[in-house]
Amino acid sequence: MELNKELFSKTVFLYFAKMSCMLRTGIALIALVFWSCSNEKKEENGFSYEKFSGLFPSEQISYQLTDAQLMNNKDTTAIRSPEFASFITDSFKTKLFGKGARVRYIAMAKVKAPKNTIYYIVKASSGTKKAALLLPFTENVFDVAFPFLIPDSDPTTTQLSTIDKSNAIIKTITQRKTNGDVAEGRDVYQYVPEAKQFTLLLTNPLNNTAEVINPFDTLSRKHKFSGDYFRDKKNFISIRDGRSSNELLLFIHIEKGECSGEIKGTLLLTSPLRGVYRQSGDPCELSFQFAGSSIALKEGGGCGSRRGLDCSFDGSYSRKKETKPKSTKKKSSSK
């Protein structure tokens, strides 16, 4: 009888122990479900970089967009995150669409950039107005918004915005004149992730007829290579004294019809008769060969961001003889 009581007590204990364990497990599962639902709601209402990036087509290494392509774009993949919308400041939206405009955002493209940065191209539209925005994300974090292409209302112009393989952002506008002539303007930018800003490398305004100004014209030219080297008055190299004998100041300007280009920076001498232009953040590289009173200049790659498509920095430039002011001597009077 005592044995049966003991067996009964053990059975009851094991039963309640099992029920207690199942109850704790059930509570844990219910808590997990509630946490999961809460987390999903939070992600739906907030910004998820993974979901945002997943809205765009596969990464590209270069990209281009015309104003006609933007205006006729039929993509419908909307970016619905309110937090994403807050990335675009009110002042930025007002400048593009007017005060109080309701803007819709559509995913268009993404382009791989250096330093863990990805460029996202987003179509912004409000009513009949449209714009393409470039938004860099570095290490999955939003940096800044940039107006990639803003169509105008001039029927004589066409626009093309490009991200080339060197990650230069090139904004080109072409205008066809009534006489058949074609004019071109171009701005070239480079994105600097550390500063979260786009740096303007080159600007050639549309219909620019201003005289070329040499910014180094009055600077010291004591070094043996300091001087002005010309192909003609619109294609020249200007070299002036720099911080040391191996580091000189450099300015280059070229023009061929509507195509033009400029470079301003530092020329580094690598040997007695050779030099290079190589600047941080600039994909363009140039090599210089000095021979007597001339320079042979050759592009090393990446210079399409610093000039138009129909001209080049390549060529031979002859040194212009420096004109020295004549000294005036007073005649001695004879007595």
Image (cartoon, grey):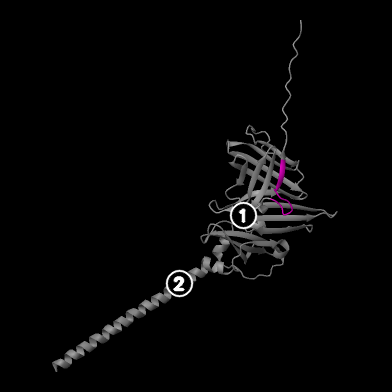
Identify which residue, 88 or 325, lies in the foreground: 325
Q: Is residue 152 above or below residue 278?
A: below
Q: Is residue 69 above or below residue 15?
A: above
Identify which residue, 193 or 78, lies in the foreground: 193
- Binning the other alpha carbons within 10 Å of mark 2 as few (below 14), some (14 to 19) or many (20 upward) gives few
Q: Which mark is residue 208?
A: none
Residue 84 drawn at (x, y percent): 56, 63
Instruction: Tell me where the magenta segment starts and ends, as one range.
Output: 307-317
Amino acid residing under circle 1:
Ser
Amino acid residing under circle 2:
Ser
Q: Which residue is found at the position 71% from the left and 59% from the top? A: 160
**Circle 2 — which element?**
helix
Picture quadrant where residue 53 is located: bottom right
Quarter of the image with the C terminus is top right
Q: Which residue is mark 1?
A: 91
Q: Is residue 2 left or right of residue 162?
A: left
- Binning the other alpha carbons within 10 Å of mark 1 as few (below 14), some (14 to 19) or many (20 upward) gives few
Q: Is residue 181 above or below residue 44?
A: above
Q: Is residue 296 left or right of residue 83?
A: right
Compute the Cα span from label 2 to label 1: 34 Å
| 311 in the magenta segment | yes
Most extreme residue toward the top is 335
Identify which residue, 239 or 71, lies in the foreground: 239
| 204 in the magenta segment | no
Most extreme residue toward the right is 179
Q: Which residue is found at the position 26% from the left and 83% from the top? A: 17
Residue 213 makes an appearance in the image? no
**Circle 1 — which element?**
helix
Q: Which residue is mark 2?
A: 38
Residue 334 drawn at (x, y percent): 76, 7
